[in-house]
Image (cartoon, helix red, strand yellow):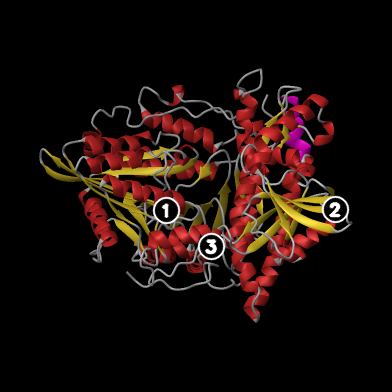
Amino acid sequence: MPQPTSVFRHEGGVFPDARRYQSRELSWLAFNRRVLEEAQDAGVPLVERAKFLAIVSSNLDEFVMVRVAELAGLAKGKGDEADDARGLLRDIRAGMRGMLADQYACWRDEVVPVLAEEGLTIVPPQSWTEVDRETLRVFWRDQLEPVVTPLAVDPTRPFPIIPNRSITVAVQLASDDGESKNAIVTVPRDNRLVALVSKPGCFAMIEDVLMHHLDALFPGHAIASRCLFRVTRDGAIEIDEDQSADLLTELEQELFDRERGDPVRLEVVDGGDPGLRAWLAQRLDLDDAAITTVGGPLDLTFLFGLGEKLDQLPVGPRPDLRDPPLPVLMNPPVWDDPFATIASGEILLHHPYESFQRVVELVERAADDARVLAIKQTLYRVSGNSPIIRALARAARAGKQVTVLIELKARFDEAANIRWARALEDAGAHVVYGLVGYKVHAKLLLIVRRDEDGIRRYCHLGTGNYNDKTARLYTDLSYMTTNEAVGRDVAALFNMLTGYSRPPELERLWVSPLTMRTNMVEAIRREAANAKAGRPARIIAKFNALVDEGICDELYAASKAGVEIDLIVRGMCILRAGVKGLSERIRVHSLVGRLLEHSRIFRFENDGKPQFLIASADWMTRNLDRRVESAVLIDDPRLTARLQAILDICLQDDCGVRDLRPDGTYVRRKAKTGDRSHCAFARLCAEAAAQASPAVGPAAAPTFRPRRKGERRK
């Protein structure tokens, strides 16, 4: 393995050339803005609009903890690099302020009134009835007061460490002797909405309940002023793996320390006391630019649970307030013997249009099958009660050779992965914690089985995590095969991950950091050469992010050579598309809608003999150089035809696609006058139904009427 290089995480270098590349961070903000547009769309069902508002907040939290924190640290230095960081920070914070203003306007002016129409209201303290006040007093006394702790701040009691992303109250007290004192009270994280008894569907915010009863925490003092706030801290984890004697133990310590990282952002509720706001900024060592005022409840991620609250109203569940559920399509429809089915022909699944359950069942069957000798699997993010983990543990206890590579450094999933690693070790599995200097992000499963005709390798390669929960929300691809070349490659890659071997020349896999970049560049250059020679040349790729300057440069050169390029990039894209003399033949499309577009497909025309790959990697420097990733060549005509159909459907969409303009803005595509709408989601549902069973063809497929922007569902 090559040695990883230390690069500032602005993927292509320190700061990109603005003439050729967009800012990665500003491109990410544009993506989160597209998510916000889904919440602003009156045609989206109410619960889904609330969910999108919550996603915007969750995304921003992670962005601040990682990207903004890194830039803020760089901006404290001196020189041109620090100047550039400060300039970019100004632009980022301006973009975030505008986004938050629009997000909270959507919440206050659009979602809250519609919620009230449907019978759910968040009631402010001034509107509580006497009955409400009495029942909330009992709630405070019995449930809330016992778990909150007032923390005085004075010369003998220093300013406390405010928990990361917690909602907290700063209080200024006026004592009998006239001396002002300050204190801090942290709001419990759970149960943000407290039901009121005066009317079904009415709720109080738990922070309002605490604020209303603050005087009970400070007897003998008057509450002079208060300020509700939230601190976001640097979420980076720094471990010197070369010097680490025990990665797992050191990572646990780093996770503890992360909750105490440097403050990066201070959010305060509009109307909070200015004096307390200034005091907080001084204590947290934050300037005015790092302070955000919000016009509504702090941390809108509580809206993820709004659907459950609506279902508890007297009218009962309201399916009309949600997107229609996806049908559970099982492909292959007959799965009595998964091994015989895979051996009879390669399988390609498109999740969640087709259920991820078949992948879970494959691992479960392998755990219980007496013919299975060994199971090897990489795990990056898994669900909280993972059936795959349970099956692997069961296989290990049964005496099978089980090897699991769990990536302990999967950001914000580190603690869960530590728990899973220990559980699998306790069951007798051999657990590898990753590689020094690299994250293992490849999605690989290898099952070695003694069939009647000899030893056979059964492989699963995916574009997404082995997570049965997110597989219902993210679009991803699963490839199952007994192809001998694929099996040899996957086995060699596992040997590299668990031992010291360097794999031989691979036949069907492109692997980062060994061959992925080289092979991608060669494929792009081949298209350019074909275009110059007058041969068929085209590139179509679907993935999550493009932030590698080297790949951008190759695409620019291919465009100039005459290659037509279509990129379906859900999130960040630093490439400038459609710029005269630079990228005239490059088109970038972002598909944002009901599902998180996570699948990665690469298609190279290859002089009329198209080459298709699915991959775990995006076109990001970290994926190509600093992670272990895999892409697999697929040449089965049935499967490549399906991959082509998926790409075509996404390119033809005119319901959720935004097209990137040369000036860096995204514009939502509209159907041509008189044309029938092309909704990728609806068409992919029908396509999956046709694949799942001949008896469930297009005529019997679920129907989803395309929704135009602003059209409210009845």
- Residue for point 63% across, 52% down: 165
Residue 534 visible: no
Say what amino acid the circle numbered 2 marks: Ser
Amino acid type, mark 3: Ala
Distance CA(mark 3)–CA(mark 2) = 41 Å
Furthest toward the top, the residue is 315
Q: Position of residue 574 (x, y in %)?
A: 57, 62
Which callout, 1 or 2, points at the residue further toward the start of the chain?
2
Q: Nearer the viewer, residue 627 or 124?
A: 124
Q: Please report the bounds of the magenta region as a residue range.
A: 108-118
Checking the image for residue 602, the label placed there is 1
Q: Earlier in the sequence, mark 3 or mark 2?
A: 2
Q: Earlier in the sequence, mark 1 or mark 3?
A: 3
Residue named by callout 3: 236
Mark 2 sits on what residue? 175
Give the residue at x 56% y 54%: 588
From the top left corner, tell me how far across and down residue 87 is, in percent. 70, 70
Q: Quadrant of residue 511?
A: bottom left
Quarter placement of the C terminus: top right
Q: CA distance from mark 1 to mark 3?
A: 32 Å
| Left or right of residue 170: residue 380 | left
Q: Please identify the quadrant where the N terminus is shown.
A: bottom left
Circle 1: residue type:
Phe
Residue in front for this viewpoint, 335 or 659 = 335
Give the crowd class for mark 3: few <14, some 14-19, many >=20 residues within 10 Å: some
Q: Residues within 10 Å of mark 1 (few under 14, many from 20)?
A: many
